[in-house]
Amino acid sequence: MPPTKPRTREREALGRAIRVLRAERAVSQEEVEAAGGLGQNAIGRIERGASAPSFDSLVGVAEGLGVPLSVLIEVYERQLARAPR
């Protein structure tokens, strides 16, 4: 079995989705981290595509953004569709 490659395209789309939602809600990375129970600099790493968040982290991000997880996923899917292949 070949080694698994990082899903760079998907990670970048998730980062863009989080940035879009943060901008719409005018909240900082720190505010999302605090409200979502995430560690320091977690959002920055996720937004840059440097970190693949766990399910629990994604739930925390959605909570920190004040949206249902389904909304975060919808915005992610739109961003993914726009990403070059």
Image (tube, rainbow, N blue to C red):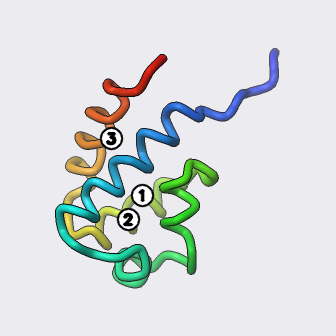
- Of residues 57 and 18, the one nearer the viewer is 18
Toward the viewer: 12 or 77?
Answer: 12
Q: Within the image, what quadrant is residue 34 found in?
A: bottom left
Q: Give the amino acid at mark 2.
A: Val
The residue at 27%/75% (across/down) is 27
Name the element at disc 3. helix
Q: Earlier in the sequence, mark 1 or mark 3?
A: 1
Q: Between marks 1 and 3, how big is the CA–CA gap?
A: 12 Å
Q: Quadrant of residue 80?
A: top left
70, above or below 2, in the image: below
Q: Are marks 1 and 2 in contact (CB under 8 Å)?
A: yes
Q: Which residue is mark 1?
A: 58
Where residue 62 appears, as percent x and y from the top left, is: 31, 62
Q: Position of residue 57 (x, y in %)?
A: 48, 63
**Residue 20's disc number:** none
Q: Is residue 3 left or right of residue 60?
A: right
Which amino acid lies under the numbered mark 3 shown in the image of this protein?
Tyr
Callout 3 touching callout 2 (CB < 8 Å): no
Q: Residue drawn 28% across and 50% down? A: 72
- Earlier sequence position, callout 3 versus callout 2: 2
* Residue at the disc numbered 2: 61
- In the image, which disc is placed on residue 76? 3
Position of residue 66 measured from the top left corner of the image (x, y, whole percent): 21, 70
Q: Residues within 10 Å of mark 2 (few under 14, many from 20)?
A: many
Q: Cα distance, mark 1 to mark 2?
A: 5 Å
What residue appears at the point 71 percent right and 28 percent down from the top-left corner? 5
Image height of 60 relative to 3, above or below: below
